[in-house]
Image (tube, coloured by chain):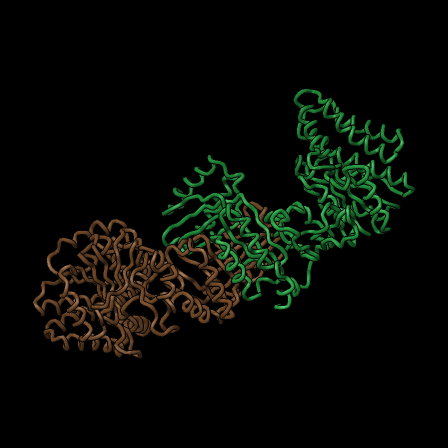
Chain colours: A brown, B green
Amino acid sequence: MKVAKFGGTSLASAAQIRKVCDIIRADAERRLVVVSAPGKRFKEDIKVTDLLIAYGEKYLADGQAEEIKQKIFQRYTEIAEELQLSREVTETLTADLQEILTAKNTADAARFIDAVKAAGEDTCAKLVAHYLRSLGEEAEYVNPLDAGLFVTDEAGNAQVLPESYERLRALRDRKGIVIFPGFFGYTKEGILVTFSRGGSDITGSILAAAVKADLYENFTDVDSVYAVNPNLVKHPKEIRVITYREMRELSYAGFTVFHEEALLPAYRAGIPVCVKNTNNPSAPGTMIVSEREASENRVSGIASDTGFCSIYVSKYLLHREIGFGRRLLQILEEEGLSYEHTPSGIDNISVILRKKDFTEAIRSRVVERIRRELQVDDVFIEDDLALVMIVGEGMRHSVGTSAKATAALAKAKVNLEMINQGSSEVSMMFGVKEVDADRAVIALYNEFFADQQQSRQAI
Amino acid sequence: MKVAKFGGTSLASAAQIRKVCDIIRADAERRLVVVSAPGKRFKEDIKVTDLLIAYGEKYLADGQAEEIKQKIFQRYTEIAEELQLSREVTETLTADLQEILTAKNTADAARFIDAVKAAGEDTCAKLVAHYLRSLGEEAEYVNPLDAGLFVTDEAGNAQVLPESYERLRALRDRKGIVIFPGFFGYTKEGILVTFSRGGSDITGSILAAAVKADLYENFTDVDSVYAVNPNLVKHPKEIRVITYREMRELSYAGFTVFHEEALLPAYRAGIPVCVKNTNNPSAPGTMIVSEREASENRVSGIASDTGFCSIYVSKYLLHREIGFGRRLLQILEEEGLSYEHTPSGIDNISVILRKKDFTEAIRSRVVERIRRELQVDDVFIEDDLALVMIVGEGMRHSVGTSAKATAALAKAKVNLEMINQGSSEVSMMFGVKEVDADRAVIALYNEFFADQQQSRQAI
């Protein structure tokens, strides 16, 4: 069987939901379907989830938020009417929604917001199930609590509990098509808790692992994952097959196809994933697999992400001090900072970290502690660093990949603040100034992809 | 004033000692002289220090080692006679030596060995002072205990105590030339302790810092420090000026001019160092300074060292685990291992360490602990790694240095296991298989030095 997950734009309107249901009906193996909440219909549109969040916050503050509520109701009513669902169905859907949105007990604000947010997916799943039945299909909405999707009690950041997999496996045996709302689960005490953003992908990945699906199809609004950000390069190369670890490294450096954690359950269970387009389902899409033949395309993609900074520390004879690196990392850990990389010279070490949690107050404290506790000769922070990555299976063992890459970057007049290659077998990482990041990505894309036919022959 | 230190080959014979004394007498500023023990006169010769160690070990084992002792006496007697020192002087020297070598109390073996080893330098210093006086110079042997060179009580690995500097400063005010034995100091309790090997360089560096010398001259048997290992490249470029940190990075990767710690006191005190040739004192030598003008030669030298290995660790979503890297390093620390570098990908990290202390038993324990305590997906060790370094001030901010380097390595068919650039401003580090190390060094030397005239114009 296949697990198919449909993203927000795939469910944004009645027309989109018709496409979704056509896709479901086109393959008898698509028996477990995970849906998001209706997303944007056009660029300036507001996603239902964002309306729900705005509603929940205003309701908590003012005790009502009628205007936003009506907008939410309108989205669902419009869709239901266009899909020609009965008035009775529409009324049931809005009544259920009304009950969640006007909860009496809002003492625990985070729980209330979680319940309100999740109503977007929940209502959408019910709606799709109704529509499929109206088309004569055997289809049922299944609630995560009934199915046994149990999670930790951390509002907005639920983690699946291991025992869920065993319970969810029973979904295999249901007759007909199961429509499952994404984005949330329940604690053992029956309290609704949402996953972090991108949570419907997580739900799909968990279900695929639980039922040991042959394939986890992830339907979105692009034909495939591209080898480079399409905002930087026109008509970039489509990726046909990519491994989990390639995908993971690209996600780290700015590829936003999946939330970082979303693929973990599918990865662990070895379930292949296919990214496909609801608006063009005949396009082959991108397969994410455990292993791939690396001979054809050594390089899969080029990615970059900004918002990094580095702490530089130097001390004469530093590297002869046993425990120096560990103590440096311990200071960061005690200050609640996670770090990304630690390139090092002989008497110096840099720690690369994301800027966002690194406030001015923490900065001066960290610098002061490093100076005092480690007795260093020098310590300072460099800002505005971007990481640019070349990702590809087998790349590491190809003599000359780094030569090609660094030559392309030099030609584009990009100065390299850092090169970090050697641990990952599938990536090479360059630190550049943020202002140089896009230029670096374009230069690398042109080097590795622009003349693909020719380089294929060369390999 | 200048502090001049003479190495073993500079003192290996009467002819060499004459050269040393000519050098001392040629510059009135050379008032503080540190000497090693007589070294090799020819390739198969044995250094006095090695004779002394062999003697000490045999004496401890057998209660006597007459044959070796006679060889040691013979070395000094020959030199003294050739220098036409009086029989009385020679007898005093050998009597002092005899007393040390036949100590009654050898209960503390390490201390006995330290005293025996140090006798090489000590006797040599006395001999040189006698010879200078025989030439009519005002010269005196000064013992480290009398001068106040106090050290920690760790046989064979003494560390200078900070208060020594203040005491040693008084050497400035001595009249005439002070001849000071290198390689050892005394604990506060008056026990002789030697430095680690290369310890005469340490003594020179400490004295230069203590008396705030204008220059620390380090006389050896080569005209200068070379940009690359002369065993790999014929007539390599001589380095005229180099900074401490360049020298430090080159020393790390196989340049054996100085013991790693030797330069620390001079570095801290900002004393320039000059490496010169006793056999060709008019050659300009190599100056080691705090800062240099980097415009002329961005790259100073190419070095490499073998004997490294790497521990590779991977775990899906590793980098989101706060404290992972710190805990990994802590395991190594608890196993008594110091590490060199930690290149990292997204879900993986490698730890590069020197193989020598990494025995089979420790290996399997470390792998087992990493697997169990960090719950990793994969962990394995790769052996036979060499580190190759390009060292040069200002190199980092030159667009294209890495492109030149990686192109040269690719052309030489050297596969890069690792690139580590970004913390040090003066070096770029490549990890290669040991079998490729020499080829990599030669390729890089040819790239950066072979056509020096032309590349100077290009800059």
State which quadrant residue A266 falls in: bottom left
User: Is residue B31 shown above or below B452?
Assistant: above
Q: Residue at x 20, y 71 (%)?
A: A98
Looking at the picture, how far across and down is residue B420, in whole percent?
51, 55
Q: Position of residue A341 (x, y in %)?
A: 47, 56
User: Nearest the camera: A38 or B387?
Assistant: B387
Name the residue located 43 percent from the left edge and 37 percent from the top edge.
B364
Image-quadrant location for residue B164 = top right
| Image position, residue B45 (x, y; %) | 71, 34
The mark total stands at 0
* For residue A222, side relative to residue B9 (left or right): left
**Residue A380: which quarter of the image?**
bottom right
Could you tell me which quadrant the C terminus of chain A lies in? bottom left
B300 horizontally vs A49: left or right: right
Query: Is B209 above or below relative to B132?
Result: below
Q: As displayed, is residue A304 above or below residue B47?
A: below
Observer able to see residue B238: yes
Residue B184 at x, y percent in the picture: 73, 38
Instruction: Decide if residue A358 is in sight here.
Output: no
Q: Residue furthest left?
A: A136
- Which quadrant of the rendered structure holds the N terminus of chain A? bottom left
Along the line of sight, which residue is nearer the eye, B153 or A278? A278
Nearer to the camera, A327 or A422: A422
Depth check: A179 or A292 in front? A292
Vertical side of B16 occupied by A347: above or below: below
